[in-house]
Image: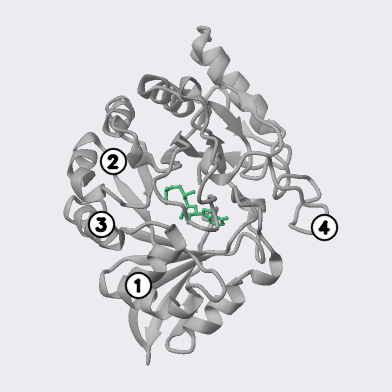
Amino acid sequence: MTSAALVDRFGRTARDLRLSVTDVCNLRCTYCLPETGISWLPRTTILTADELVRLAHVGIEHCGITKIRLTGGEPLTRPDLAEVVRGIALAHPETEIALTTNAVGLAERAEELAMAGLHRVNISLDTVHAETFRQMTRRDGLDRVLDGIRAAVAAGLGPVKINSVLMAGVNDHQLLDLLDFCLDHGSELRIIEQMPIGATRDWARENLISATMIRAMIEERYQLREIPGRGPAPAQRWEVLDDGRLMGSVGIVASVTEPFCGNCDRTRISADGQLRSCLFSHTETDLRGPLRSGASDAELAALWAGGMWTKPRAHGSDAGGFGEDFEQPARAMNAIGG
Ligand code: SAM
């Protein structure tokens, strides 16, 4: 029963919950985290599995949430991840539960997660070249990610989508190798424009590999045909054709150059229980405190709806855009949930 729909001042309704289960990550992607000196959130503030399940329940039962994506940080760093999935799936079998992961260690856990009720995974992979993987993530592990992709498919967690960020001079020239890998494996590649949200705080527009550049690179080898009916999805999807023959599809998330905030249907809860109406919000609504002090479902739902009402028009402000006025929020991507 939806008693507190997540509507905002601009008439958007949020139904898609990004629920972060941790801020900790086992990779150090250069556009996301610094190599050292990271201050993780205090462990006592991180929501327990029961608390995550409770918030998911409030969202579904009272706030009109129809889809939940577990994210982080790296969700697989939580040993009790399957418990979270199981708790949500048992109470709400009709709700789609997805996971965003770097897939390091997924090979060992894909089956357990599928059995627990997970429906789909999006796997982040920026390159299929081991040396570039090492350079971008500051870790070894490409083979483990590839094993994870295979295990996810085998466990029925497909179709697997592959999320990638392109960096100028680092992996952008390998885009077609990555696309061919995805086409060969029946996965959809989704390229995300790099956003000013990393803990490294070194984003610069002049380094951006834009959607226009991405399409041009793909069209050096293939033809692209736009897939209509995008709805609130962040990715614009394209069919990939080779001399007229359909090879698969590709998605481009052009948050910077072709923003889609007008159709945004997302609501986010950080691993420490802070509701954020927008990835770039400067304000948060504390749900952890009330949750731990015994608030009822209806009280939590009312707080959630109140926090969403003030959702900014675009990119963290009503002015919107990543221009000179843009200010990066204090929380970085890993502590929000990507
Ligand atoms: N650890 C998980 C993973 O790797 O998928 C989940 C969290 S990660 C923050 C989620 C996604 O955000 C990844 O696909 C990552 O590439 C993307 N991401 C991180 N920083 C980004 C940035 N500055 N701009 C665009 N995407 C970013």
Q: What is the distance, in whole Å, between disc 4 and disc 2 at their CAs? A: 41 Å
Amino acid marked by disc 4 = Glu
Return the mark for residue 265: none
Q: Which of pointers 4 and 3 lies earlier in the amino acid sequence?
A: 3
Q: Nearer the viewer, residue 87 or 205?
A: 205
Indicate which label's residue lies in the foreground, 4 or 2: 4
Q: Which residue is mark 3?
A: 144
Distance (Cα) linking label 4 and label 3: 41 Å
On screen, residue 181 above or below 195 = below
Q: Residue furthest front?
A: 36
Which quadrant would residue 329 be assigned to in this image? Answer: top right
Using the image, determine if residue 38 lies above or below residue 182.
Answer: above
- Front-lying residue, 146 or 84: 146
Residue 306 shows in this picture: yes
**Residue labelled with disc 2:** 118
Left/right placement of residue 128 relative to residue 137 reads left
Disc nearer the start of the sequence (2/1) = 2
Q: Which mark is first along the chain, 2 or 4?
A: 2
Is disc 4 placed on a helix, strand or loop?
Answer: loop
- The CA span between labels 2 and 1 is 29 Å
Q: Which label lies toward us, 2 or 1?
A: 1
Residue at x 82% of width, y 57% of height: 324
Where is mark 1, residue-wise? Answer: 129
- Is disc 2 surrounded by few (<14), some (14 to 19) or many (20+) residues within 10 Å? many
**Pick the front one: 118 or 24:** 24
- Sort mark 3 into few (<14), some (14-19) or many (20+) by Cα contacts within 10 Å: some
Q: Nearer the viewer, mark 1 or mark 4?
A: 1
